[in-house]
Amino acid sequence: MTAEEKYVAAAYLVVFAFVFVYVLIMATKVARLERELAELAERARRQERHRAVHESHELTEEVEVG
């Protein structure tokens, strides 16, 4: 292998390493975003259930008073 070929191989290796690190960083960010999205969705579901229970309780009180 000539010196030029070694330099080309080293350059490809460096580019591959940068791309690999970039993909790892993006995968970590996507995983974190998925966890946060799941948490927000669960909070929204709990809030909606709470709101529904609260509204049905208010309707029951109106029927009893009325």
Image (cartoon, helix red, strand yellow):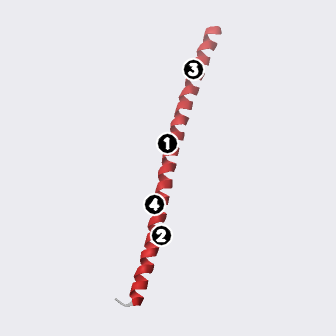
Specify the label residue 13 is tagged with. none
**Residue linked to disc 4:** 24
Residue that carries the numbered disc 2 in the rendered image: 18
Pinpoint residue 65: horizontal percent, then vertical percent: 65, 9
Say which element carries label 4. Answer: helix
Label 3–label 4 contact, CB within 8 A: no
Q: Nearer the viewer, residue 41 or 55?
A: 41
User: Residue at 55% of width from left, 22% of height from top?
Assistant: 53
Q: Earlier in the sequence, mark 4 or mark 1?
A: 4
Q: Could you tell me residue 33's position as x and y percent?
A: 52, 49
What amino acid does circle 4 point to?
A: Leu
Reading the image, the residue beneath label 1 is 38
Mark 2 lies on a secondary structure that is helix
Q: Amino acid at mark 1?
A: Ala
Mark 3 and mark 4 lie on one chain; the one further toward the N terminus is 4
Q: Residue at the location (46% across, 57% down)?
A: 27
**Foreground tag (3 vs 1):** 1
